Amino acid sequence: MKKLPLLILGLMLTGCMGDRSDLELFVTTTKAQHVARVPPLKEPPKFEHFAYQAELMRSPFVPPSRELTEEVLDTTKDCLQPDLKRRKGRLETYALDNLKMRGTLSEDKNIWALIETNDGSVYRLGVGEYVGLYHGRIAKVTQQMVEIVELIPDGTGCWAERMSNMELTGE
């Protein structure tokens, strides 16, 4: 009884061993008609030797030293200079273009501006606080705008004051 399934399986497999000459003829004619054409490879570019001549320069993979990233002041000149020993304010890492005035808060005679950063945080700033990349100090806050006095380097080691305004936006 156990041999019956093996016998049936053997008969089925022998049925698959028929004449395959037509299939072999088709394969050989197809291979003869369709020859694969591989285009020749392009000539490799000529190698040009480059002599590295920046051995004495700072490696781009090493962070710059502190002296290269600090602002250098010429204290020998008697002109307007920012106070670099002052601790930077929380909004002095943003350019004024990335800040928006969103409103004001007031209590008695004090008025504060609500300033939004480009990452969505909102800060309350008053007169005398610093904002922007150029040592900008808030000079005046009104219901419609904030006046900021920035210190811009003039290229000779001195700094010049520049007035900037940040107006209320209702976007």
Image: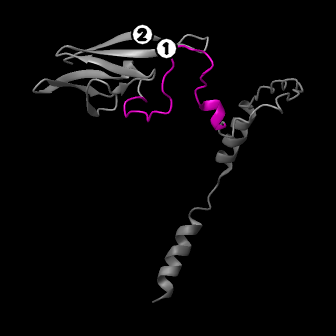
| Quadrant placement of the C terminus | top left
Quarter occupied by residue 72: top right
**Badge 2 vs badge 1, beta-carbon distance below 8 Å:** yes
Of residues 81 and 114, the one nearer the viewer is: 81
Q: What's the CA distance linking mark 2 and mark 1? A: 7 Å
**Picture coordinates of residue 98 (x, y %)?**
37, 22
Q: Is residue 60 above or below residue 167?
A: below
The residue sitting at the left extreme is 108
**Three-letter code, disc 2:** Arg
Q: Residue furthest bottom?
A: 1
The amino acid type found where label 1 is placed reads Ile
Query: What residue is drawn where x is 37% and y is 25%?
Result: 131
Which residue position holds label 1? 152
Q: Is residue 157 above or below residue 21?
A: above
Looking at marks 2 and 1 on the same chain, the residue that comes earlier in the sequence is marked by 1
Which residue lies under the disc numbered 2?
Answer: 162
The secondary structure that most of the magenta stretch takes on is loop
Instruction: Report the residue at 52% width, 79% height from top.
Output: 7
Crowdedness of circle 2 by 10 Å Cα count: few (<14), some, many (20+)? few
Residue occupying image coordinates x 72% and y 30% = 33
Query: Left or right: where does residue 116 sit relative to residue 161?
Result: left
**Residue 49 in which image quadrant:** top right
Q: Is residue 113 left or right of residue 156?
A: left
Residue interval drawn in magenta: 65-93
In percent of width and height, residue 39 lies at 77, 26
Q: Secondary structure at mark 1?
A: strand
